[in-house]
Structure formats: structure tokens, C-alpha cells
Image (cartoon, helix red, strand yellow):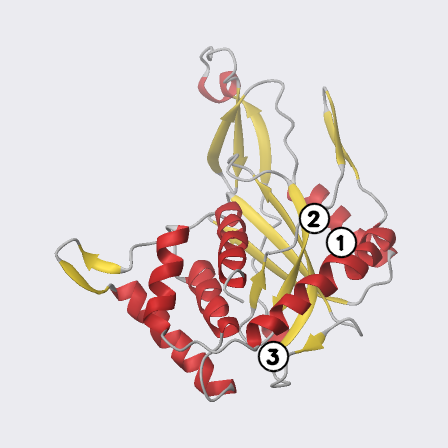
Amino acid sequence: MYLNRLQQDEIFVSNEMKSLKIITGMESRRGLENAVISNDKIVNVVSNSYGHIPNELFFKKAEQLLLDANLKYHKRTINRNDRSFIADFIIEDHNQFSLKNEQDKILPMLRFKNSYDGSEKTSGHFGFYREVCTNGLHVAQSEIAFSIKHSKNNTDLIMPKLNFLFEKFLDNEYYEITRKFREMEEIVLIDTKAFVKEILEKTKLFRYECSDKNDNPSKKSRELLDMIAEEGHDYYKTPTLWDGYNAFNWMLHNTLKKTFSQQEKFDKILFDEIYAMV
């Protein structure tokens, strides 16, 4: 059901790299000779040596990797202000697994990322997709290595064959991390307030208290506590560490204003800190 209504932003917006001298009629500073234009907006100013990678080149080559590997997938695309973009390829096959409530399905996922404003490194990595909340779980370390060749008038990408990389991911990280998911599912949260406060103190994601003079949970902390309670009541008699991690993950991807890279960084930190409680 969730896979049929994935976000589908337009990521193939018009884009080009154009000389500032041509645009303005004036000389520009060395190292800032060109403007990157996305959907008729200047989003970056770069040097002559900068290699602009259009989404049409990168994401279409990335998708071809999955087609060549004969992998069945669902695609989600996100466009943030015509500046940064991701394409998630959620792989739906026999490799999916469910946690003990049978509704909580986890699928392997490939994420590819590009930006026109320089905020994100052009990259690809493996991850997980949690079907019940439509969130990505970016706790895997396996990246998709590729090389970029620049010439005066062209930028070319050399991508690897995906078959071997995907099998290696399944044989190693996928099953190791999903084992940890199951372990987290077995640990009941007795004191959710203490849990949230401890994780926030360790990760510095945001502040637990309202202020220095008010120790009560902040608005974000209350929202987090409500989500943990709701997740717990939906699937278990009491919330678990798995519920706690997913509540943090949901807030990270939906409430907090973070770049894609910051989301992935904090997701790994959150997972490690919460799993350490097992």
C-alpha cells in the first residue's frame, strides 16, 4: 500500500552552467567564473574547473544499474527547492523481512543523491526502507563507488555493475543490521522520558527541556514521546527500543530541518546510541 504512494517530485528540472561574464557583461573573480542555474534560478557560483553533473546523467545511469541487475524496485524522488535531489530505489523481492508484528516490513534500498548548490556530494549508498512509516533508515555503511571524468565540454560518470555489490550487501550488512533491529524490538522501554532525555543529551539532536528555567519537555520532546507511545500501542503492549528509534527517525526526516547528508549522519548516530542500550 505505502509503496504505491511514494513521493514523486520532479528531479529533472532545467539546469545549466553558464559564464557569469556572459550573464552580467562584467569580469568575475577568479574561482567564481560560472553560475549553476536550476529551473531558471542561480543556485551556485563555481570555478572553471567545476564539473557540473546534471540529474539526467546521474539518476538515469543509477536507475540503469538496477535494470541491468534485473532488480525489481519502487522509486521515490525528492526535490528540495531545485537545489538538492535524491532518488530512492526500494527493492521489493524475497529479501524483505518482517518484525514479529508482521506488519513492520523492512526492504533493502539504494539512495542516490545529487545537488546543484554544492550542499550535497554526488553519491550513492545502501539503506533500508520501513514500509509502515515510509521512512528511510540510513544506518548501512556500504556505498556505491563510481568515478567522475571531467573534460572541457563534458562530464562523464563511470558506474559499477550492481549485481555483485547488492549480493555482498545482503550477505554482510543487511542481515547483520536487521538482526540488530530484531534485538531492539525485544527491549521494552520502561521509562520513555528518561530514554528520550538520555538520547538527546548524547546526540545533541535538539534540547529536551523547554529552557534553562523550565525542565518540562519541549514541544519537540513531547511530540517524540507521543510518537513512541503511539508506535508502542499500535504493535505491542508497551513501547520498545525499536519504537524509540523509529520515532527519532521519523522526527529527523519529517520535523527537523536538516540536509540529506545531515539526516543520514544523525540517523547513524541515533541508531548506534540506541542499539548500545540493548
Residue 131: which quarter of the image?
A: bottom right
The three-letter code of the residue at mark 2 reads Phe
| Residue 118 position within the rendered picture, expressed as x and y whole percent measured from the top left | 53, 34
| Residue 126 position within the rendered picture, expressed as x and y whole percent measured from the top left | 69, 54
Label 2 secondary element: helix
Viewer-proximal residue among 30 and 219: 219
Residue that carries the numbered disc 2 in the rendered image: 59
The three-letter code of the residue at mark 3 reads Asp
Q: In the picture shown, does residue 53 fall above or below 47?
A: below
Residue that carries the numbered disc 1 in the rendered image: 63
Left or right: where does residue 240 sit relative to residue 195? right
User: Which of the two discs, 3 and 1, sits closer to the camera?
Assistant: 3
On the rendered image, what quadrant is the N terminus found in? bottom right
Residue that carries the numbered disc 3 in the rendered image: 104
- Please name the residue shown 52% across and 19% down the image: 22
Categorize mark 1 by other alpha carbons within 10 Å: few (<14), some (14-19), many (20+). Answer: some
Judge whether residue 205 can be spotted in this image. no
Residue 100's disc number: none
**Contact flag, marks 2 and 1 (Cβ < 8 Å):** yes
Q: Residue furthest bottom?
A: 237
The three-letter code of the residue at mark 1 reads Glu
**Contact flag, marks 3 and 1 (Cβ < 8 Å):** no
Categorize mark 2 by other alpha carbons within 10 Å: few (<14), some (14-19), many (20+). Answer: many
